[in-house]
Amino acid sequence: MLDSTIARMEAVATKAGLNFIRINPRVTRNDDTRTLDIEFVIERGPRIFVERIDIEGNVTTLDRVIRRQFDTVEGDAFNPRKIREASSRISALGFFAKADVTTREGSSGDRIIVDVNVEEKNTGSLSFGVTYGASSGVGGTVSLSESNFLGRGQFVKIELGGGSDNLNTELTFTEPSFLDRDLRFSINAFRSSTTQQNAFYDTRNTGFSTNLGFPISENGRLDVKYRYASNQILNVDVASSALIVAGTRNLSSIGLTYVFDNRTSGLSRNSGIIFRVSQEIAGLGGAVGYTKTSALIGGRTTRFNDALVLNLELEGGFLSDFSGTSSLGDRFFLGDAIMRGYQSKGMGPRDTTVGTNQDALGGNMFAVARLEANFPIGLPEEYGVSGGVFMDVGSLWGLDDLDGGLIAGDGLDLVTTSGFNLRAVIGVSLFWKTAIGPLRFNFSRVVRGPSYDEAESISMTIGTSF
């Protein structure tokens, strides 16, 4: 904790433009009270500059991949904190079994040479994940990835996943330093399909997206995205709602996402926040025109020497159709990933008309609050088992008049299904660090909500890499 406090104080000094600052703690023991008094002495150290950065041990990885982890270049003022941060970033790349960053005296007393000695490791992985739901059954994913493609630090992954009623395929390529700048460029191609997934129709979605992200502050990042997709609804049952129309619709959209996250880098070691807001505009070509906005704000804090971890998140979204052409595939659908305790497409507006299939219709608006506490449950630490409790509160609501004003004539019960209807879920979690990966069980119970929702009382996820 002392080292962390010093590092954060040094960060404040650097932001204020104070170079060559040293912070030395002076500790006084109080034997009578068995306490320690800590006094931080801020001193101006000697003027030392970085003469050069030497890199050794990299056979496959290019020098520039390692060098760009440094905020310091030759000729800059020597800042031990920045060197430590660079060392942490090099280790966090995951490319090396060992990454030692040391310093030694340069050609003169006011010069420092930074030595980087690395030992490479395999960076390809074959990963497996398993999910389980009480009603949806067993599902899983398998992915093959390379995180240091051709030694350039590029990321390539192909993933295949799904279950009894859905199948997803995805190919991703990411260049973390596009044009040798702090620009993250990625391109993603995808195909997903569902077969009677909590509904009496099938879907097929195929397309691609590109993303360019860059930092705009120490903890803030902006991403610019373009997406093109061909969305199909097919095999619609004759008893399905009149709002579910078979056909193919092409979507072309641009979007912006801003994220601020200081949960691991803020001035407080025990707490931090995340804020994310996204805006997507569809209508630049294609047959769909809308604006779709979503936002999330969350906080994390620890207590009792990090034994208790508290998380609170608020998330919401709003879809505004400006072309009169938005459809089922454009709306929000909520399930266990956003609000625990529900199946995929399990909550929200639903056609409850007698004689229909009571399909989920999605909604134009949603809001969810998630509160979670994680803690040890008394077992020895080597067992890797801990527990948690959670409570989710929220709703999904709102439908457009998509049937030329004849929705009421089609028998859609808008009063009971499309209005705001608060849901509340409570549950407990069990976390287990197994030899094949982290395992999480959620046991949940809906304590408030309409009877037509599709709940999920038990869910499990597990993931690992080989």
Image (cartoon, rainbow, N blue to C red):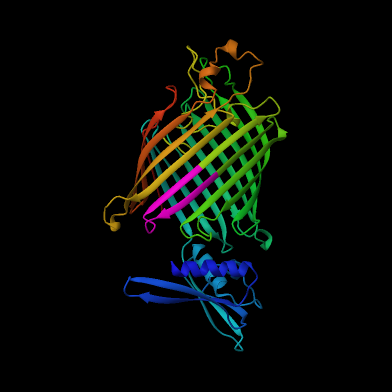
Q: With 156 as the anchor, is 31 left or right in this view?
A: left
Please tell me which residue lies in front, 296 or 288. Answer: 296
Establish if 226 lies above or below 92.
above
Residue 299 forms part of the magenta stretch: yes
Residue 359 x, y percent position in the rendering: 50, 22
- Region of the chain picked out in magenta, as a range: 297-313
Residue 401 x, y percent position in the rendering: 63, 20
Q: Quadrant of residue 204?
A: top right
Residue drawn at x 53%, y 60% is 265
Q: Is residue 333 visible?
A: yes
Residue drawn at x 51%, y 39% is 168
Q: Main secondary structure of the magenta part?
A: strand
| Residue projecting furthest to the bottom | 108
Residue drawn at x 42%, y 49% is 310
Establish if 315 lies above or below 345.
below
Q: Is residue 466 visible?
A: no
| Residue projecting furthest to the top | 409
Establish if 154 lies above or below 75.
above
Residue 372 x, y percent position in the rendering: 42, 44
The N terminus sits in image quarter: bottom left
Please tell me which residue lies in front, 54 or 204. Answer: 54
Q: With 281 as the anchor, is 6 left or right in this view?
A: left
Residue 314 forms part of the magenta stretch: no
Residue 414 x, y percent position in the rendering: 55, 18
Please tell me which residue lies in front, 447 or 362. Answer: 447
Q: Quadrant of residue 220?
A: bottom right
| Residue projecting furthest to the right | 284
The C terminus sits in image quarter: bottom left
